[in-house]
Image (tube, grey):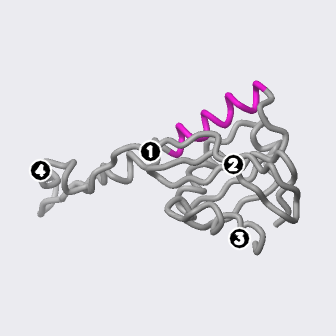
């Protein structure tokens, strides 16, 4: 993938977002960190307190269980929406002209739901990989090989 000079690169998952700027050129990337944000998101078992509830039907036999809420996933989705909102604000301030987003497939899907039209207009590439835990040279290599 070609990463233009001064392109804004966001590497995110449901817990962490990294904002980079490419200070290199399209062929020789040099990503510099602009911002790092991480939130604590415990496992779902640590966030939920009870089993899902049950309902009794007055018509017909049987009981029905409510679907269990995955609080961990809800928090990851909220964090993705928050990331999209930060991108919207920066796009409206003209902080970047070209944007590349790197995120795992599920997070990328949540981000896409929340993209503002200004963000979409500046989006030049997406990579569906989880690279938030990787060092910068690995991220640069993954982008160059995409």
Residue 110: x, y in percent? 56, 51
Proximity of marks 1 and 4: CB atoms separated by less than 8 Å: no
Disc 3 or 1, which lies upstream in sequence? Answer: 1
Residue 18: x, y in percent? 58, 48
Residue depicted at 54% across the width and 56% down the height: 107
Q: Residues within 10 Å of mark 2 (few under 14, many from 20)?
A: some
Q: Secondary structure at mark 2?
A: strand
Number of the front mark, 1 or 4: 1
Q: What is the distance, in whole Å, between disc 1 and disc 2 at their CAs?
A: 18 Å
Residue depicted at 13% across the width and 55% down the height: 51
| Displayed quadrant of residue 134 | bottom right
Name the foreground residue: 125 vs 144: 144
The residue tagged 2 is: 32
The residue tagged 1 is: 38
Residue depicted at 83% across the width and 45% down the height: 6
Q: Which mark is residue 24?
A: none
Disc 4 or 3, which lies upstream in sequence? Answer: 4
Disc 1 or 4, which lies upstream in sequence? Answer: 1
The residue tagged 3 is: 141
Q: Quadrant of the C terminus?
A: bottom right
Proximity of marks 3 and 1: CB atoms separated by less than 8 Å: no
Q: Which residues are magenta?
A: 80-93
Q: What is the distance, in whole Å, between disc 2 and disc 4 at their CAs?
A: 44 Å
Q: Secondary structure at mark 4?
A: loop
Number of the front mark, 3 or 2: 2
Proximity of marks 4 and 3: CB atoms separated by less than 8 Å: no
Number of the front mark, 3 or 1: 3
Name the foreground residue: 52 vs 109: 109
Q: What is the distance, in whole Å, between disc 4 and disc 3 at their CAs?
A: 45 Å
Q: What is the distance, in whole Å, between disc 1 and disc 4 at their CAs?
A: 28 Å
């Amino acid at each position: 993938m070609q990463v233009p000079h001064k392109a804004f690169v966001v590497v995110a998952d449901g817990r962490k977002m990294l904002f980079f700027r490419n200070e290199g050129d399209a062929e020789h990337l040099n990503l510099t960190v602009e911002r790092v944000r991480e939130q604590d998101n415990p496992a779902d078992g640590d966030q939920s307190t009870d089993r899902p509830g049950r309902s009794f039907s007055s018509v017909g036999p049987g009981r029905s269980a409510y679907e269990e809420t995955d609080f961990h996933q809800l928090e990851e989705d909220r964090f993705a929406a928050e990331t999209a909102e930060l991108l919207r604000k920066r796009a409206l301030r003209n902080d970047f002209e070209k944007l590349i987003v790197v995120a795992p497939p599920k997070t990328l899907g949540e981000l896409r739901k929340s993209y503002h039209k200004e963000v979409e207009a500046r989006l030049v590439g997406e990579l569906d990989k989880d690279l938030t835990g990787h060092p910068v040279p690995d991220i640069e290599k993954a982008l160059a090989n995409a």
